[in-house]
Amino acid sequence: MSRRQLFAALALVLLLSLLPWQQANADAGPPPPSMTFYFQTDGSSPNITDIVLRVCETPACDQFTLFPPPDEQHEPWEKIWLRCQEARCIAVGVPTGKYYQLAVRMDGKPLTSNVFTKKAYAAKYQVTIEGETLRVREIALSKYAFFELINPWYSLLFLFFLFFWVALAWTLSMETVVWVAAYVKGWRKVKAHHLFIANLISLPVVWFVVPLLVYDGHLAFAVGEAFAFLFEGGVYLVFNRAAQISAKEAFAFSAIANLFSLLTAVGAWAALELLFAAPSVFLALLFLGIIWAFAFVRSYR
């Protein structure tokens, strides 16, 4: 591969890394600390028109900050919110190691709770009305009902891991196609098991480490692609010295393999969206693609 081809491949990988083809990964990473408040009433659904959570430094709660903080005090991508639905309110991204107090306007009346603490990471509380005040008590884990253990964040985390394994299988499959094509062409300086080792290390870093360090979705995608390209190229260079592989060849193979995996993933996702949005168009394009592939194979022979 010439130097011009190498630089062209690298430039294309970097360009694609900057394109906003996926949304910010706001749900990536572990679920943030949360609080769930269950309001116990006389059977009727409470009308909660306003609620804030005071985050206090002392048990007397004489000095406090409000949660969630005003918009200008936190970034839009941060997982920080407090929402209510009927008799349940959920606070996500709550600071830990503090004292807390609820201030609620319920059924037109302002109510303030006792000062309480937080023990569990995803803590659950029972809130009862005692006169003109609220009584907040944390529910012990041993008393959780089974359905209460099912947290929406855990479902998102499960989907995140599921997509990771799908992405891993796709990446290994597509980069193996590139390796087979190079092998058929007579270029055999990268061992197949080195390709698997490189991806089994780089992909978990891209999915689980980079989102914890880089919060912007587009920037995290660019950093992840750059890391995968550099790390995998380095692995091919170090592990295949006996085959007299050069740095240009190692990083060119890494660039081509990562680019092919990325483009096919984007194409597959677009095809899936087209299948649900316009099935007839999808089938027509699929038919044309099969005809083109058949003609290409015949001409190649």
Image (cartoon, rainbow, N blue to C red):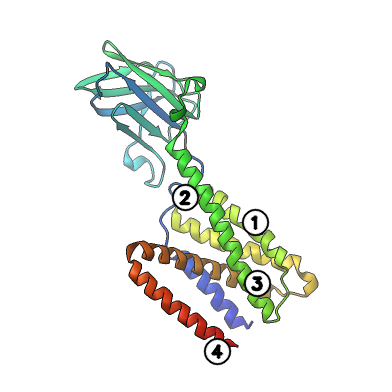
Q: Label 2: which residue?
A: 215
Determine the image quadrant of residue 259: bottom right
Residue 222: x %, y % from top left: 50, 61
Q: CA distance from mark 3 to mark 1?
A: 16 Å
Give the farthest residue toward the right.
242
Q: Which of the two residues, 249 or 3, is positioned nearer the viewer here?
A: 249
Per the rendering, the mark at residue 299 is 4
Mark 1 → mark 4, Cα distance in angstroms = 36 Å
Q: Nearer the viewer, mark 3 or mark 2?
A: 3
Mark 2: which amino acid?
Tyr
> In this rendering, which labeled residue sits more in front, label 1 or label 4?
4
**Image quadrant in which the N terminus is located:** bottom right
Dots 2, 1 in contact, CB < 8 A? no
What residue type is disc 4 on?
A: Ser
Disc 2 on helix, strand or loop? loop
Comparing labels 2 and 1, the label whose residue is closer to the camera: 1
Residue at 58% over, 87% down: 300
Up-down: is 281 above or below 101?
Answer: below
Marks 2 and 4, Cα distance to the nearest angstrom?
Answer: 48 Å
Q: Left or right of 118: which side holds 283?
A: left
**Mark 2–mark 1 distance (CA, rounded to whole Å):** 23 Å
Q: Amino acid at mark 3?
A: Trp
Q: Which residue is mark 3?
A: 179
**299 versus 103 height, above or below:** below
Secondary element type, mark 3: helix
Residue under the point 30% across and 23% down = 103
- Across and down, in percent, residue 119 comes to 50, 23
Q: Quadrant of the C terminus?
A: bottom right
- The image's mark for residue 159 is none
Residue corresponding to mark 1: 200
Residue that lies at the very extreme toward the left in this rendered image? 108
Q: Upstream in the sequence, badge 1 or badge 4?
A: 1
